[in-house]
Image: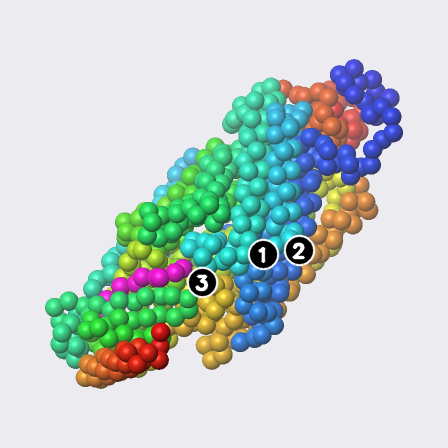
Amino acid sequence: MSETPRPELVVDGYPGKPRPRWIELITSADHKDLGRVLICGSLGFLFIALVEMILMRLQLAIPENSFLTPVAFNRLLSDYGATAVFLFAIPLALGLFYYVAPLQVGARGTALPRLGQIGVALWAAGAAVLYSGFLFTPSEAGVNPLAPLSELAFLSNNGVDAWATATGLATLGFVFIAIDLLTTLRNMRAPGMAWRRVPIFSWAASVCCWLLLTIGPVLLAALTMLMIDRNYDGIFFADGSGGAPLLWQHLSWIFFSGAYMLVLIFAFGAIAEIVTAFSAKPLFNRGVTMGSLAAIAVLGTLAWMQNMMTAPIGIGWMYFAMLMSLALIVPFGLIVFNLIATMSGGALRMRAPLLFALGAISAISIGLGAEIEQSMVAAAWQLKNTTDATAATHFALVGGAVFGGFAALHYWFPKMTGRTMGESLARISFWTMAVGIVLAFVPLFFAGADEGQVIDAYKFFNHTGVNAYNLIATIGTFVLAAGIVMTIVNAILSRENGPEAGHDPWHGETLEWFTLSPPEPHNFDVLPDVRSARPMRDIREAIAHRSSRDERPARESQPVA
Amino acid sequence: MLWIGFAAAAIVVVAVNVALIAAVRRNRAARGTQPRQVSGGRRVQFRVGAVLTVFAAAIFILSIVFTDRARETPATGSAGLAAAHAAPLKIKTTGQQWLWRYDYPNGAFSYYKLVVPVDTAVDLELLSTDVVHTWDVPDLAGKRDAVPGKINDVVFRADEEGDFRGQSATLSGQAYAAMRTEVEVVSPQAYEAFVKSQLAEIETAQDRVVGLIENGEVP
């Protein structure tokens, strides 16, 4: 490639001695490097979250176990929640968005690269704070540290402060990345790419950025109040002095409900892109699908009080939360219908990305099906805070972030590395994960709905009818973890040794497949005029048409760039 | 109520997964047909949207009907406590790390175990003195949170005598898992006797403490 003159390149290589690759990576403000940092980092934290989950499940394998002390269990629980949400699910989604979306819309970089770089650095700082365990004791207040338990009077060591600092730094980073990405998507699209032609994954990125700009500051406000309460005798969440313990629940659940939706919007964006490419068909009713993704963000966030059905709030508010939750059936249903309609009449190539994408739809359908029951007021009075809720959330979020995230990872891995991930290991990993998720979480539905086993408890009692359920769930967690680790290993091995992918291994229809794999720092030398939602298909057709007319040999796999 | 939710969930799961499997089986590339380049269909989308809206609305309405039924204050039956015929028997229920305290109308109180008369409407006024707890006895009533500074109500009527158990359902610290809820449902006579004996015991204990203080044995 270096023979080709590149007058538009300002810098062609660095003068002097080349710096080591890792220094380049952590000092780069390029969206592809930052995206890779987020993706690799979040996969590492996925592994840590799995270890924490396994330790907790080992404690819950048999009744009245004494493998972990209550304090150790609560610390693992708190760190598991923060890791899974703030260090794995959201950054994996953002990392893939950040890498792929600018390429998809034909941007040569992001609009505010330094802001994105600061964002990733803040996220890394948050992760470092959460895991510098030797400097402080981890939080014991649970996944969502409900006030007043999170107040100084009840947890006086600095674990909760560390939790709040870590999640706050990470959230601030997400907001910065969202600002950068949103500005890019709004201002730097290729000529001709109107919003109706924006690839569905980039549209999902834009929706998620708006969502983060809405819910991120809410959590940051709540965390600030918590820190003032804990360190400066504040009264925001203290009862009896003008504060309100329920205020924390409102603010934090707005964030967590929005984050739940963010993961699902990301997953469906990726799934839609993959299903479209692997069916060799356009996305069915593209406009409705785009609108549905936006509707999920709005309705899902407005449904935050679904998590407060047993709190002392008015019944009207519970009905409002139920209405918003049940209204989600419509956009989710339309998206799933449109995906299936996209597949029907298509020519499906059953490769690993599609397999994971279909698995994600299946797992999310189980999770959200169970969430219907969780959102019906009188049923919620029975089911809330039982392991039924754990299972519902995990089916939806493992389905979205792990199955959906892995689908996206398999799909765009060739773009990032120039190599595809090993197909047979991917298949073994997928089926192991599929068996694992069913074994790990279906028993918890029964334990929660039939026997009322509560969440977050470090032990359960003998003769409460849940022994077998919990043992199966523990075994299932090991199976699920084994499947997940296989994909992480597959990614590490395939980075150097995977089969060569070429620049467009899946015959994708969006612009990221127009450039090299991996792309050059400036992404594109030239850009086509975008005339439809499927620019790559237009280009292929134009080339085929021209070569048949001129009887010139078709171009090699060398892209136009 | 639970079965409606379960049915709705089952419909969603079965519909999505059957459609997925069918779509995959019927549209493999191995069939060798050319993919049809269809990009949309307005009518089918409206129909699907309408079906989904009706499905969601039906669950919403059914849910409100059943929830309103569950919220109705039950009437005290003929076998119940006579004093509770006009209004439910109010018992102040206070959660604290990691036990429950029950204050009965006549000044008696008990820890850990709640004793209520059978066939009687009972209104537990939940409050917490420290962190959020959840009062839950699945076989008697739905769960409710006890939050500091804001009263929450659990209203129920136990139709048969016996022991009922539950567990707090909100993480409240180290001994959260051991925060059990116990309810003993007894006959109205036994309830009256229990309350009286509690009161007597409390008075005896208080007299003893007062005596100790007067004798100077306790500062």
Question: Do callouts 3 and 1 mark residues in contact (Cβ within 8 Å)?
Answer: no
Q: Residues within 10 Å of mark 1 (few under 14, many from 20)?
A: many
Q: Position of residue A138 (x, y in %)?
A: 58, 56
Q: Position of residue B64 (x, y in %)?
A: 28, 54
Disc 3 secondary structure class: loop
Q: Compare residues B190 and A437 and report the one nearer the observer.
A: B190
The residues tagged by marks 2 and 1 sit, at their Cα atoms, a distance apart of 9 Å
Q: What chain does mark 1 sit on?
A: A
- Going by the numbered disc 2, the residue's amino acid type is Phe
Q: Which residue is mark 1?
A: A138
Q: Which residue is mark 3?
A: B172
- Going by the numbered disc 3, the residue's amino acid type is Ser
A23 to A400, vertically: above or below: above
Q: Position of residue A178 (x, y in %)?
A: 56, 34
Q: Residues within 10 Å of mark 3 (few under 14, many from 20)?
A: many
Residue at the spot 45% in from the left edge and 54% down from the top edge: A151
Q: Position of residue A90 (x, y in %)?
A: 57, 44
Q: Which residue is mark 2?
A: A134
Disc 2 secondary structure class: loop
A558 to B26, vertically: above or below: above
Quarter of the figure with residue A225: top left
